[in-house]
Image (tube, rainbow, N blue to C red):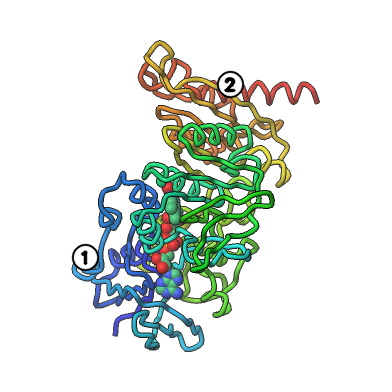
Amino acid sequence: MPERLVVIGGDAAGMSAASQARRRRNRRDLEIVAFERGRHVSYSACGIPYWIGGEVARERDLIARDVATFADEYGIDVKTNHEVVGLDLSTRTVSVRQVDIGVIEPVAFDQVVMATGAVPVRPDLPGLDAPGVFGVQTLDDGERVRAAVDEGARRAVVVGGGYVGLEMAEAMARRGLEVTLVEAAPEPMSTLDTELGAMVREAMTGMGIAVRTGEKVVGVEVGQDGRAVAVRTADTSYPADLVVLGLGVRPDTALAAAAGLPLGETGGIRVDHRMRVLGEDGVWAAGDCVETRHLVGGHAVHVPLGTHANKQGRVIGINLGGGYATFPGVLGTAVTKVCDLEIGRTGLGEAEARRIGFQSVAATITSTSAAGYLPEPGSVTIKLVAERRTGRLLGGQIVGRGGAAKRVDVLATAITAGMTVEEMISLDLGYAPPFSPLWDPVLVAARKTAEAVESAEYRH
Ligand SMILES: Cc1cc2nc3c(=O)[nH]c(=O)nc-3n(C[C@H](O)[C@H](O)[C@H](O)COP(=O)(O)OP(=O)(O)OC[C@H]3O[C@@H](n4cnc5c(N)ncnc54)[C@H](O)[C@@H]3O)c2cc1C
């Protein structure tokens, strides 16, 4: 009898784990069954805003592999519309409910991968569960929003200004809706320090999105038919044909918690460096449902990004296949864009560094993403945060145009290598007029921050 691997959740983390395990173990040795409660597997949630906004023509372009491909090419039995409703570690079985008919059946496993992802945060406020209020996490969620837009919604309110909120606001503005974004913080994109967040607000306003910051949502008003008609804040209300929640996500751990799996302080499942659930033999977890370690601060974090989900799934697959792989942790490197304004961040922000006890200095520069004599070179603002005394780079944020955001990868690499801002000044980065000024903005920012480190020590 082959060993049986059950995967719970059929997207980035789960299907990466399954595919990688299959590369290393053949069908006679390992049977792989993946359960997905939705209608799709192996889809790009990251692409949903671009499909809703019309930049991606067909929904199927977001699907990397379908059920038939997994069966034929990988020998992986993927069951969509199958929800795992119970996990019993003593009998090593999962209870699986067929979503369409409600029948529940037990399925035995030798190894199990928890890849249940996350669920949008939905505060307990009046009206937030009304029809017309949408969280966006899975492709099925995306289909519901897209249908509401196609059915002729005219006014949309996005609650929360994280990157999903931003991308969804832009998508709906592109489709011609009147869009209002309501955010409780002083600026959108709270993963940026506020002065950079202000630039994001300006860009959104510039594309016709009404951005209401410093306003807390207190509920959703519903019409006589029970559907959402407006988003209410303390002072006013914003009419809406559809409401999109962009308040972040929390790990989907209902199943894990009921099975007694350990959860960390962030709410995610606790795993070791090989993505094994702590204290449980043959139980693995990856993706948005786990917590991980911050590579700079060393603290536990929940950073729900596809890039981590895929890497963590791969680590599980290698380990399941008899190899050895580890996941070291994250910097929280992320990029996004609003209209043509690109946004990147990695490591610790200034406020965050202070909060977890670092003494730090920061410097912000504004430069261009191409030589200044070329027509309309994009402006780039970079803020770096370095440790006082050592000058070690702790984090960086970039807002700008014309190829600004992916410069964050240089910063992420420098942090990973433990570089100081002084060392970064000599980095051998490429230069030609269409790509950067002679001194790349990253180098200028490193220079300014090194000066700040030096003068902080001098002052001390
Ligand atoms: C709009 C949007 C844009 C994004 N953009 C980016 C981006 O640009 N870059 C980036 O890195 N990340 C991005 N992300 C985040 C990224 O999509 C997620 O981090 C990634 O999908 C997580 O993968 P996962 O497999 O852990 O979870 P998910 O993709 O959420 O998959 C979990 C799956 O498990 C299923 N499931 C849950 N419970 C059960 C159960 N009990 N039984 C059966 N099935 C179950 C769910 O239906 C779901 O399909 C974006 C996310 C969204 C929503």
Q: Is residue 410 above or below residue 119?
A: above
Looking at the picture, how far across and down is residue 460, in whole percent? Answer: 80, 26
Return the residue at label 1.
69
**Residue 8 visible (yes or no):** no
C-beta proximity under 8 Å, tags 2 and 1: no
Q: Is any atom of residue 52 visible in this view? A: yes
**Residue 437 sits above or below residue 234 on the image:** above
Beta carbon at label 1 within 8 Å of ligand 1: no
- Residue 254's tag is none
Apparent side of residue 427 relative to residue 61 in the rendered image (left or right) = right
Q: Say which quarter of the image contains residue 306.
A: bottom left
Q: For the residues marked 2 and 1, what is the alpha-carbon distance in whole angstroms?
A: 51 Å
Q: Secondary structure at mark 1?
A: helix
Image quadrant for the N terminus? bottom left
Question: Label 1 is placed on what type of residue?
Answer: Thr
> Local crowd at mark 1 within 10 Å, few (<14), some, or many (≥20)?
some
Per the image, label 2 sits on a secondary structure element best described as helix
Extreme residue in the left direction = 72
The numbered mark, 2 or 1, whose residue comes first in the sequence reads 1
Q: Nearer the viewer, residue 404 or 111?
A: 404
Instruction: Identify the residue at the far right of this view.
Output: 460
Q: Residues within 10 Å of mark 2 (few under 14, many from 20)?
A: many
Q: Look at 30% across and 72% down and name the residue there.
A: 78
**Front-lying residue, 369 or 412:** 369
Q: Amino acid at mark 2?
A: Arg
Name the residue: 38% across, 85% down: 102
Residue 239 at x, y = what percent? 53, 52
> Residue 336 at x, y = what percent?
45, 41
Q: Is the CB of mark 2 within 8 Å of ligand 1?
A: no
Label 2: which residue?
Answer: 447
- Where's ligand 1: which quadrant? bottom left
Percent position of residue 196, x then y: 58, 33
